[in-house]
Image (cartoon, rainbow, N blue to C red):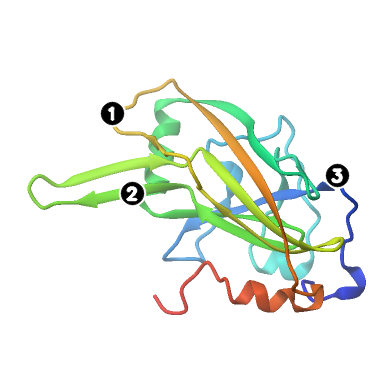
Amino acid sequence: AILNVALAAKYSDGDKVTVYVNKVGPYFNPHETYHYYQLPVCRPDKIEHKSLTLGEVLDGDRMAYSLYNVQFKADVENQELCKVSLSDEDLTAVRDAIEDLYYFEFVLDEIPVRGFVGHLEEGGFLPHNHKVYLWAHLHFNIEYNDQQIIYANVSTKDRSPISLDGVTGPFDVTFTYSVKWHQSVTKYEDRGKRMRDSSFFPKTL
C-alpha cells in the first residue's frame, strides 16, 4: 500500500492526519504482539478499530483510532493527550512491559511509527542499579512534500521520563505530545526507500 501512488492521500493545510495505535510487544521478539490498548494508556471512551486488509490481519495488526490530534503542517508545541491514574496493578503491567523492552507501533498515513514504552537503566555490580522510567511525552517528526506525507517517526525529545521506582497506586500520569513538520525533497513514490533506510529494528540482533 505504501507504494500505491494512485491511492496516495493528499492533504490540504490543517487537514486531520489520523494516527492509529496498533500493537505493542517485546523488542527482541517482534512476533509476540498485543493490542496497544491492553496497556494502561490514553484511550478513547469507545475504542473504534480500523477495518483491516487481509495482509494487515496476517501481520498481526490491530489498528484502532487514537486520541492524537495531528493536522497537516500544523506544529504542536506541547499538547495534553490525557491523564491516567495508574493502580498498583497498572504499575506492575507498565513496569513489566518496560523491563521486557516493549516497543509500540502506531500507524500514520500507512507509515509504521515505533518507539519504546519506557527506559530501563541497569548498571553496577554491587550495588546493582535497576531503574524503570516511563516515557509520557512523544514528539512526532513528520516529513512532507507538497500535499503528501513522506516519512514520520517519534522521539522522546527534550523531556525527562517519569521514574516508576518506589511508586504506588493510585499514581497520576499526564501524557503529552508535540508535532514538528519538516519539508522534504523526497518524492512520494520514493518514500518506501526512505522508510527502509530508517528501520527501527537493527539489520542484525
Q: Nearer the viewer, residue 86 or 192?
A: 192
- Distance of label 3 from label 2 (alpha carbons): 37 Å
- Distance of label 3 from label 1 (alpha carbons): 43 Å
**Helix, strand, or loop for circle 2?**
strand
In this picture, residue 111 sits left or right of residue 196: right
**Helix, strand, or loop for circle 1?**
loop
The three-letter amino acid code for the residue at tag 2 is Leu
Quadrant holding the C terminus: bottom left
Please tell me the numbered disc located at residue 120.
2
Q: Position of residue 202 (x, y in %)?
A: 46, 73
In this picture, residue 133 sits left or right of residue 155: left
Q: Position of residue 64 (x, y in %)?
A: 72, 47
Callout in the foreground (3, 1): 3
Callout in the foreground (3, 2): 3
> Is tag 2's residue or tag 1's residue first in the polypeptide sequence?
2
**Helix, strand, or loop for circle 3?**
loop
Picture quadrant of residue 113: bottom right
Q: Residue at x 77, y 61 (%)?
A: 144
Quadrant holding the N terminus: bottom right
Q: Residue at x 90, y 69 (%)?
A: 7
Question: Would you call the spot at circle 3 few (<14 residues within 10 Å), some (14-19), or many (20 or more)?
Answer: few
Question: Would you call the spot at circle 2 few (<14 residues within 10 Å), some (14-19), or many (20 or more)?
Answer: some
Q: Nearer the viewer, residue 39 or 143?
A: 143
Quickly name the residue at label 1: 166
- Distance of label 2 from label 1 (alpha carbons): 15 Å
Q: Residue at x 61, y 39 (%)?
A: 177
Q: Nearer the viewer, residue 121 or 101?
A: 121
Quickly name the residue at label 3: 14
